[in-house]
Image (cartoon, rainbow, N blue to C red):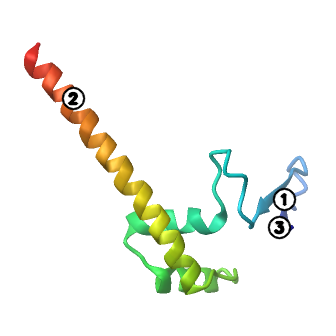
Amino acid sequence: KKSWTYKHLSPKMCGLEQTLETDVLDRSTKDMDVNLATTLAAVPTGIGYSQCEEMMAVLNVPFMAHRTYQRCHESVAEVICKTALQTIEEAGKEEAALAIA
């Protein structure tokens, strides 16, 4: 299983150890893998693959391949479109209800 552990090293801290999973999580949960989360963060900020890759290089974090980013971008775009359509429909229903009242 691909993962790494980040341990808080401050002696004043409680010694909490957290694990960040880098592989795909169980799809039955609402959690998403790190690649999808990174792509989802990139889209609304207006940055693309090259900017993400550069940012991760500065942090010394290996970044996903361009093909993987494209697949994640397609998945994220699909979710964004569905969510936007649902929001528009709900707003229309609310506006219609207010107009009738």
Q: Left or right of 19: which side holds 90?
A: left
As drawn, the residue found furthest toward the top would be: 101
Q: Nearer the viewer, residue 56 or 87?
A: 87
The spot of residue 75 in percent (x, y) is 49, 64
Identify the residue at the far left of this view: 99
Q: Which mark is on residue 93?
A: 2
Dot 1: what SS? Answer: loop
Quadrant of the image containing the C terminus: top left
The N terminus - image quarter: bottom right
Please say if 65 is above or below 26.
below
Question: Looking at the image, which residue is at 63% across and 86% down?
Answer: 57
Q: Which residue is mark 3?
A: 3
Amino acid type of disc 3? Ser
Q: Amino acid at mark 2?
A: Lys
Mark 1 or mark 3: which comes first in sequence? 3
Residue 23 at x, y percent in the picture: 74, 66
Numbered disc 3: secondary structure: strand
Image coordinates for residue 77, horizontal then vertical, percent? 41, 63
Q: Are marks 2 and 3 in contact (CB under 8 Å)?
A: no
- Check disc 3: other Cα within 10 Å, few if <14, some if 14-19, many if 20+: few
